[in-house]
Image (cartoon, rainbow, N blue to C red):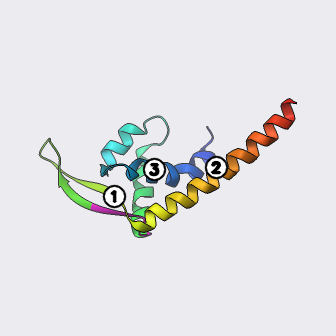
Amino acid sequence: MSREMKKGMVDLVLLNEIRSRGVSGVDLTADLEGLFTPGTIYPALTRLERGGFVKASRRRAATGRTRKEYELTAAGLEELARLSATWDSLKAAVDRLRAVGNG
């Protein structure tokens, strides 16, 4: 997948991953290995936090280390819904174009 395509999807993917559970950046980098690098994930988390879409809190991990965990805010849930709707519309349009090209 091209870098430009990934850049356009990072917020949607991160918000979706964070939605179901409080998750640390370390967990996200492990879960999304091969799709996004830590150099993409951490700046995006900072941007999402500054935008009010996620909130971070410090939690002690099983290892004893303190880690920053992210949770969605109400604004984050709304942004996830908006990005998901945009993705669904884009996917449907591309699917229609591909079907015409194969028909």
Q: Amino acid at mark 2?
A: Asp
List x then y, in percent, for residue 12: 52, 52
Magenta residues (range):
51-56
- Of 72 and 4, nearer the camera is 72
Q: Amino acid at mark 1?
A: Glu
Looking at the image, residue 9 sits to the left or right of residue 41; the answer is right
The answer to whether residue 30 shows anywhere in this view is yes
- Of 78 and 67, nearer the camera is 78
Give the residue at mark 2: 88
Quadrant, the C terminus: top right
Q: Residue furthest left?
A: 64
Give the residue at mark 3: 16
Q: How many C-alpha atoms fall within 10 Å of the one at disc 1: few (<14), some, or many (≥20)?
A: many
Tell me the element at label 2: helix
- Of 24 and 16, nearer the camera is 16
Distance from Cα at disc 2 to Cα at disc 1: 24 Å
At x 30%, y 52%, the residue is 22
At x 50%, y 38%, the residue is 35
Residue 19 lies within the magenta run: no
Give the residue at mark 1: 71
List x then y, in percent, for residue 78: 49, 64
Q: Amino acid at mark 3?
A: Asn
At x 38%, y 51%, the residue is 18
Label 1 or label 3, whichever comes before in sequence order: 3
List x then y, in percent, for residue 94: 74, 43
- For the residues labelled 1 and 3, say whether their Cβ atoms are less than 8 Å apart: no
